[in-house]
């Protein structure tokens, strides 16, 4: 029996390669059908690649689109090289520390903290423009295939902005991944008002947005691919670790708010305060690898390296296979995230 699910894809810079691995497994499983995707930042890139690939070439087309996308970002995707590189490289934690304390990253980090991206004029335009410009937006925006929403943050109002359908273009994806300390805000004309609006990374207001997936025509199941650890045991004490944890907390806050709202509605439905059918009884699932993400840092998010991208992809594949092995029968039947324990 085919399991129809919605996917919520978090943003987290180069750590989105973990989601690439998860998606590879889901796409190659004929028993899983992706009904809709909501993505932010790296999640928006992954979501657009999947949607375009499914429309143009089915499951194989989506897998190939993801491979192309991450090869453009910096991954080594040639099968004859990737296993050797992974086997001969040091641990992810070692690479993360080496990158974090490298002189090049220290200079980059200092510059972005002290200097506005507007100082450099067009030099600080988002480099993703080169990649997303090659997306086939007639397929990304097509009415066929899974529905797709991409999240950005309106700079002036501070409100969430969801792009869908014909409104998804290169600028919408770049807006979803626009970190304000690195890049100038992306300006896009509002299709309804005609006003030019400025946008920053969607992670501040929806990482990713869950509420578009509540539509009654979509399945009850939302599978969140989480790449920002919800919990860190180690207290951050140096400036980079503190900044990294601030980033994780702020980028998880919108997701936690929506999960708390789902938990509240589920309690009202369970005790009869609200009648069945009055609100959607969302079934929440999550795929993550907090152990790996705790070993990484803001440097590995910001600067993609082939070794880390390979480790993340492999970890995503392992995590997705473990999830399906444990919870395939739960899909379309019950949630597998204990929301009460999460918010107790």
Image: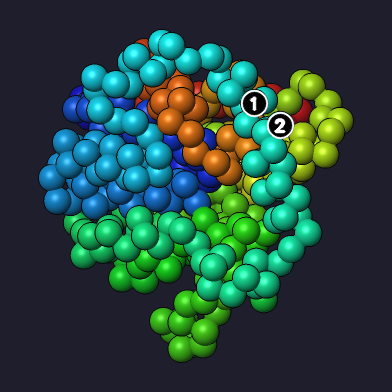
How crowded pointer 2 is (Cα within 10 Å; few <14, some 14-19, many 20+) is rated as few
Find the residue positioned furthest to the left: 57
For numbered disc 2, what is the local secondary structure? Answer: loop
Q: Which mark is residue 101?
A: 2
Q: Which residue does the numbered mark 1 point to in the structure image?
A: 98
Residue at image position (84%, 33%) is: 238
Q: Disc 2 vs disc 1: Cβ atoms closer than 8 Å? A: yes
The quadrant where residue 331 appears: top left
The location of residue 264, given as percent across then percent down, is 65, 41
The location of residue 223, given as percent across then percent down, is 44, 35
Closer to the camera in the image, 82 or 226 = 82
Q: In this rendering, does residue 189 appear at all? A: yes
- Say if 252 sits above or below 122 in the image: above
| Viewport quadrant of the C terminus | top right
Residue 327 is left or right of residue 147, and the answer is right
Residue at image position (53%, 14%) is: 90
| Viewport quadrant of the N terminus | top left
- Say if 297 sits above or below 137 in the image: above
């Amino acid at each position: 029996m085919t399991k129809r699910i919605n996917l919520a894809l978090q943003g987290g810079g180069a750590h989105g390669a973990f989601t690439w691995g998860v998606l590879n497994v889901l796409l190659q499983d004929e028993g899983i059908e992706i009904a809709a995707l909501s993505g932010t930042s790296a999640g928006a890139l992954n979501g657009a690649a999947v949607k375009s690939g499914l429309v143009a070439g089915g499951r194989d087309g989506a897998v190939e689109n993801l491979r192309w996308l991450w090869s453009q970002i910096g991954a080594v995707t040639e099968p004859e090289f990737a296993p050797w590189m992974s086997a001969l490289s040091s641990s992810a934690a070692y690479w993360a520390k080496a990158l974090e304390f490298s002189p090049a990253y220290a200079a980059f980090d200092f510059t972005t903290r002290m200097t506005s991206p507007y100082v450099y004029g067009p030099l600080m335009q988002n480099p993703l423009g080169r990649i997303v410009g090659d997306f086939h937006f007639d397929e990304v925006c097509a009415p066929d295939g899974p529905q797709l929403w991409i999240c950005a943050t309106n700079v002036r109002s501070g409100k969430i902005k969801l792009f869908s359908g014909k409104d998804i273009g290169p600028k919408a994806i770049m807006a979803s991944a626009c970190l304000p300390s690195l890049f100038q805000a992306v300006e896009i004309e509002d299709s309804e008002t005609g006003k030019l609006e400025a946008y920053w990374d969607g992670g501040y207001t929806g990482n990713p947005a869950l509420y578009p997936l509540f539509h009654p025509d979509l399945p009850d199941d939302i599978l969140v691919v989480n790449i920002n650890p919800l919990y860190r045991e180690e207290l951050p004490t140096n400036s980079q670790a503190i900044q990294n944890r601030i980033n994780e907390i702020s980028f998880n806050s919108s997701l936690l708010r929506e999960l708390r709202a789902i938990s509240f509605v589920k309690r009202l439905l369970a005790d009869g305060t609200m009648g069945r059918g009055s609100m959607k009884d969302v079934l929440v699932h999550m795929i993550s690898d907090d152990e790996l993400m705790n070993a990484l840092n803001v440097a590995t998010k910001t600067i993609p390296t082939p070794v880390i991208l390979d480790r993340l992809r492999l970890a995503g594949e392992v995590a997705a296979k473990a999830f399906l092995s444990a919870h395939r029968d739960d899909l379309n039947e019950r949630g597998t995230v204990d929301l009460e324990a999460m918010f107790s």
